[in-house]
Amino acid sequence: MREVRRRNWSTEERLRIVRETLEPGVIVQAVADRHGVSTGQLYTWRKQMLATAMAGFVPVEVVPQAPQLPPPGSVMSPDSSVPSGMIEITLASGASIRITGCADAATLRVVLAGMGGR
């Protein structure tokens, strides 16, 4: 009887293979066959990677904006003719939360608590 050896895939290899399965029009079975892994294993890796990604922090992008005239009815800083700050949080689900005006720590705590501490 022939001994079957299990292959140990590095995290980088698994990530690369899983990314292949996420490309539009790709057939998961074809990716599995090409790399000598079962489709069940691929779906397990995808599930593990999604769980890991959702458990950690997500990248934050700070987008500088050129000064512009405030839109009608916007909240203005008391000591300036420039609109006060804005914070926008976009969740993976596509939902977004925008806070304009004074976004102090208390306001942020209330918003984040309303999101269930996420």
Image (cartoon, grey):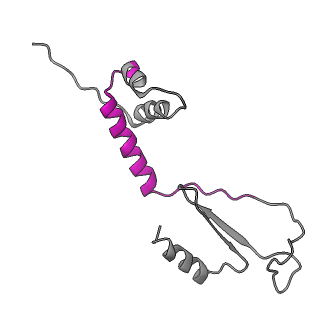
Which quadrant of the rendered structure holds the N terminus? top left
Residue 108 position within the rendered picture, expressed as x and y whole percent measured from the top left? 58, 77
> What residue appears at the point 41 percent right and 44 percent down from the top-left corner?
49
- The answer to whether residue 43 is magenta is yes
Q: Is residue 105 above or below residue 16?
A: below
> What residue appears at the point 40 percent right and 19 percent down from the top-left corner?
34
**Corner quadrant of residue 82:** bottom right
> What residue appears at the point 66 percent right and 65 percent down from the top-left corner?
88
Which segment is the magenta one?
34-63
Residue 53 position within the rendered picture, expressed as x and y whole percent measured from the top left? 45, 51
> What residue appears at the point 46 percent right and 71 percent down from the top-left corner?
117
In the image, 73 versus 55, the foreground residue is 73
Could you tell me how many numbered marks the image carries? 0
Mainly helix, strand or loop, the magenta region?
A: helix
Which residue of the protein is positioned furthest toward the bottom in this rendering? 78
In the image, 41 versus 79, the foreground residue is 41
Task: Name the side, left or right, on which 12 lies relative to 77.
Answer: left
Residue 63 position within the rendered picture, expressed as x and y whole percent measured from the top left? 73, 58
Which residue of the protein is positioned furthest toward the left in this rendering? 1
In the image, 22 versus 17, the foreground residue is 22
Q: Is residue 41 above or below residue 3?
A: below
Q: Is residue 106 above or below residue 96?
A: below
**Corner quadrant of residue 7:** top left
Residue 8 position within the rendered picture, expressed as x and y whole percent measured from the top left? 30, 30
- The answer to whether residue 37 is magenta is yes
